[in-house]
Image: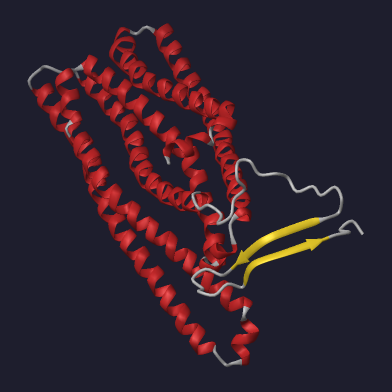
Amino acid sequence: MFRKFISYYKSHRALFILDMSCAVVASVLAILIPVLTRSLIGKYLPSGNSRKIIITLILMMGIYIIKTILTFIRVKWGHILGVRMEADMRRDLFSHIQKLSFSYFDRVKTGHLMSRISNDLSVIAEVAHHAPEDLIISTVILILAYTGMFLFNSFLAFICLIPLPFMLAWGLIMGTRMRHGFRMVRKEIAEINSAVENSVQGIREVKSFANEKLENKKFHKTNTSFRVAKEIVYDRMARFHSVMQFLRELYYFSIIAGGALLIFRGELLLVDLLAFILYIGIILPPIDRLINFTEQLQQGISSFERFQEIMDIRPDIEDSSNAIDFNPKDGKISLKNISFKYDKSPDWILKNISLNMINLRK
């Protein structure tokens, strides 16, 4: 399934490379701010070096301007990348639906198909854009930020690592649960769409037979199932985000507690603690991205699974590899020993029928 999803990036390589390049460059530039701040406050201000103070401030402003431009490019063309992939998937899905047999449409409600063509693919488009972008930005910033922190003070940097494995473990545990919940919600959305469509399309029959109460009862049952499914998902989301928020706040606590201890023992300068606090301000947004990435990825996986379910369905009748194109030249067709019956029916509608048709061109 993962390879099939990746294949939709191939025709949009240029946009993907542009989006990821902007994300990486912006992440690297963000790491330079604490370094410049540390040099400004720890070296240039105490020494009164006005020239280097001005240069440092200009560099910092230049970084902010470049990051703004990169953010514009990333947001605009990253979303366009997702939209174009969504259009490709919708094209392939609709084309595949046209090939399916009547038996499939007898089993599947139209509302379910509409939900997969519209709602599910919109979710996939967001994941196609944000998932790789958030993952790359978060990875680059975390690696570079922790590298800089270990260079400044390895003991304090190690303390800051303590909440990270707990966050990753909790994300994996709750991520699986949320994926099942989001898949349940997608199914219930399809049921809602199907119930509304059937009722509206058959409104004349509903009113003719005075079945309004029955339709209301059926819709209430579907609507209740949808509400319960969403409540389950939000319960899991609340657990996920509340614990993540606590672990997230531990970063500041770790820096303050560890930094205060080291300063008290004379093993850390105040300016280094300031740099660490700035690094935490840079580290926390990528952690937030990873948190949102986990939630969004689960939605995307559940949506793509529903998309792939349809793409994996094969028509009951398919052309063989050596099929011959139908192109009568003399206006005659002969059918020999043709048989036909419906699925699960013991009786044949046609059996061993032969026909000769002539003068088709007339």
* Pick the front one: 321 or 109: 321
- Identified at 44% across, 23% down, the residue is 24
**Whole-percent x and y of residue 164?**
22, 34
Residue 34: horizontal and vertical position, in percent?
A: 33, 21
Tell me: residue 222, above or below residue 103. below
Residue at x 28% of width, y 53% of height = 177
At a point 19% along the width and 23% down the height, the residue shown is 157
Q: Quadrant of residue 256?
A: top left
Q: Where is residue 56 in the image (x, y as percent from the top left)?
A: 42, 13
Q: Residue 160 appears in which quarter of the rendering?
A: top left
Tell me if 276 is positioned left or right of 67 in this view. left
Tally of marks: 0
Residue placed most toward the observer, 126 or 93: 93
Note whether residue 219 is visible. yes
x, y percentage for residue 347? Answer: 54, 75
| Along the viewing direction, whichever of 213 and 97 lies nearer the viewer | 97
Q: Which residue lies furthest to the left in this view?
A: 265
Check the image and report above or below for 129 versus 331.
above
Q: Which colour scheme is used?
A: secondary structure
Quarter of the N terminus within the rendering: top left
Q: In this view, does 171 lie to the left or right of 256?
A: right
Q: The C terminus appears in which quarter of the rendering?
A: bottom right
* Left or right of 267 in this view: 78: right
Can residue 241 be seen in the rendering of this structure? no
Q: Which residue is drawn at 73% across and 45% down?
A: 325
Depth check, front residue: 153 or 359: 359
